[in-house]
Image (cartoon, grey):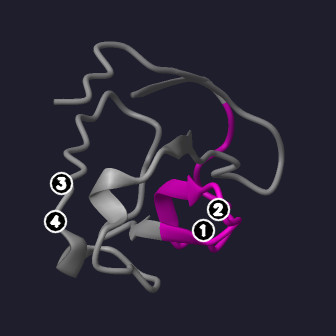
Amino acid sequence: MMSFAGDFRNQNSATSLVRLRFANDSSVEFPIYERYDGSAKTFYVQFIKELWIGKFDDQWYMRPFIVEILGDWTRGWETIGLDNVEII
């Protein structure tokens, strides 16, 4: 991820980087562990349930879900570029 525009000195208090939304409208979130300053950065989001916030049921990995890559990093506006997004 890399910022093309935006003032990253005044950030929102975002707490999650990615959200998985399930068909029953429940969701879990992968927390942000460090502040993003707008420079080129690689994030690794692991699909290990202990690293996520929220309530998983025992069969979560077998249910369809939507992957939401969250944004809105600053209190103003920003333009972010994503490259090499892989789901393995």
Residue drawn at x 68%, y 34% is 6
Q: Which residue is mark 1?
A: 14
Q: Quadrant of residue 68?
A: top right
Mark 3–mark 2 Cα distance, whole angstroms, equals 25 Å
Depth order, front residue of 8/62: 62
Queried whether the magenta region covers residue 16, the answer comes back as: yes
In what quadrant of the picture does the C terminus appear? top left
Compared across the picture, whether 88 is left or right of 30 comes to left
Residue pointed to by mark 3 = 46
Task: Give the mark, 1 or 4, whose residue is nearer the N terminus.
Answer: 1
In space, the residues marked 2 and 4 are separated at their CA atoms by: 28 Å
The earlier-in-sequence mark between 3 and 1 is: 1
Mark 2: secondary structure: loop
For residue 11, which numbered disc appears in the image? 2
Residue 48 circle label: 4
Task: Rate crowding at label 2 as few (under 14), some (14 to 19) or many (20 or more) other CA atoms within 10 Å.
Answer: some
**Mark-to-mark CA distance, 1 and 2:** 8 Å
Q: Which residues are magenta?
A: 6-28
**In the displayed structure image, the side of residue 41 where residue 1 appears, left or right:** right
Residue 15: x and y in percent read 53, 73
